[in-house]
Amino acid sequence: MNSAPKYGLVIHGGAGAIRREKMTTDREQAYRSELSKAVQTGYDVLSDGGSGIEAVQKAINVMENSPLFNAGKGAVFTHDGHNEQDATIMDGSTLQAGSIAGVAHIKNPIDIARLVMEKSQHVLLIGDGAESFAKSHGMDMMAPEYFFTDLRWQQLQKAIEKERIAKNDVSTHLDHDGNLGTVGAVAYDKGGNLAAATSSGGMTNKRFGRVGDSAIVGAGTYANNRTCAVSTTGHGEFFIRSVTAYDVSALMEYKQLSLTDAAGLVIKDKLTALGGIGGLIAIDSEGNIAMPYNSEGMYRGYRLSDGRSDVKIWEDK
Ligand code: ASP
């Protein structure tokens, strides 16, 4: 039990204002069970000798297919009542990466991000172009109704109403309470390779083609075998400005900080000082993990080959 893990995986299902007192037992149970399923799915890939890339993709697919998370099926709505999803995947062994932004008809956005990484010469594709690329690789398009969930629709109505009452300037009202559930995964595989991935519907009531950190390599996702693999969640504008995921890696590479110190510094000190809310998950090339956040909670879970595993939403009481 005390030897370093030989492989492992950490996932998140979003950070933000998850109020313990408002959470019903049934809802908490539903989250815990989907998180456990995602952890187990990714872990099984690793224990069968699969790659970190395959593990993070498969773990994310489980959450993208669940209405509970703000990715795939449960994606939040834009101001105009559409879904525009962002996703990124990165391979720490090659520093290859693939991202997509603003896609509206893709069941599993992380799957196209992986196609962009492996089958194109590009890193980031957006909107219709990204969807044509997906079609050219045989990916099925979903009708917009597939992504309709009443909860997300109500969250949009609330955000619009808040905006109306506050008579906010048109570009301002992104309601972070209403977008919980971005999903991410990071893995360390048996071959010693690191991988990271993130998938998100972005923020409720976004408009003007707003793109979040989940589509930006270095902000929402980063992996480098020399350091660590990172996936973030929270108010994306702050993560883009802070280049958060890369910052954790850079602190390890250039300042020799440990994973825990680097991840803690980036979220608890730097993001907080800037006024940003959210968290990240990370794993390093020795199998150490970190899951810091500065919000009320963060849906998260992990399983490591040394036997440790857990699923959590808040800190223990
Ligand atoms: N980071 C995502 C975005 O800003 C949202 C989230 O993680 O809650 O698009």
Image: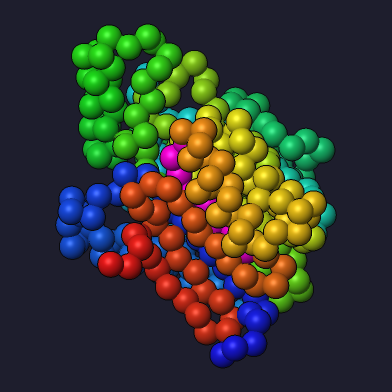
Whether residue 123 sits left or right of residue 127 in the image: it is: right
In this view, 204 is above or below 146: above
Magenta-highlighted residues: 276-283
Q: Does the segment drawn in magenta span residue 278?
A: yes
* Residue 305: x %, y % from top left: 59, 81
Q: Nearer the viewer, residue 22 or 108?
A: 22
Q: What residue is rendered at 46% in x and 33% in y?
A: 275
Q: Which residue lies furthest to the bottom in this view?
A: 1
The answer to whether one can see residue 285 in this image is yes
Q: What residue is rendered at 32% in x and 36% in y?
A: 178
Main SS category, magenta section: strand
Determine the image quadrant of residue 158. top left
Model colouring: rainbow
In this view, 263 is above or below 214: below
* Residue 6: x %, y % from top left: 67, 80
Q: Nearer the viewer, residue 106 or 257?
A: 257
Q: What residue is rendered at 59% in x and 54% in y?
A: 263
In this view, 261 is above or below 151: below
User: Where is the N terminus found, in terms of image quarters?
Assistant: bottom right
Q: Does the segment drawn in magenta span residue 137?
A: no
In the rendered picture of this protein, how many numbered marks are placed on residues? 0
User: Where is the C terminus found, in terms of image quarters?
Assistant: bottom left
Determine the image quadrant of residue 123. top right
Whether residue 177 sits left or right of residue 158 in the image: it is: right
Q: What residue is rendered at 34% in x and 60% in y?
A: 314
Q: Which of 279 and 305 is in front in this view?
A: 279
* Residue 128: x %, y % from top left: 60, 25
Q: Nearer the viewer, residue 108 or 224?
A: 224
The answer to whether one can see residue 99 in this image is no
* Residue 248: x %, y % from top left: 66, 50
In this view, 287 is above or below 155: below
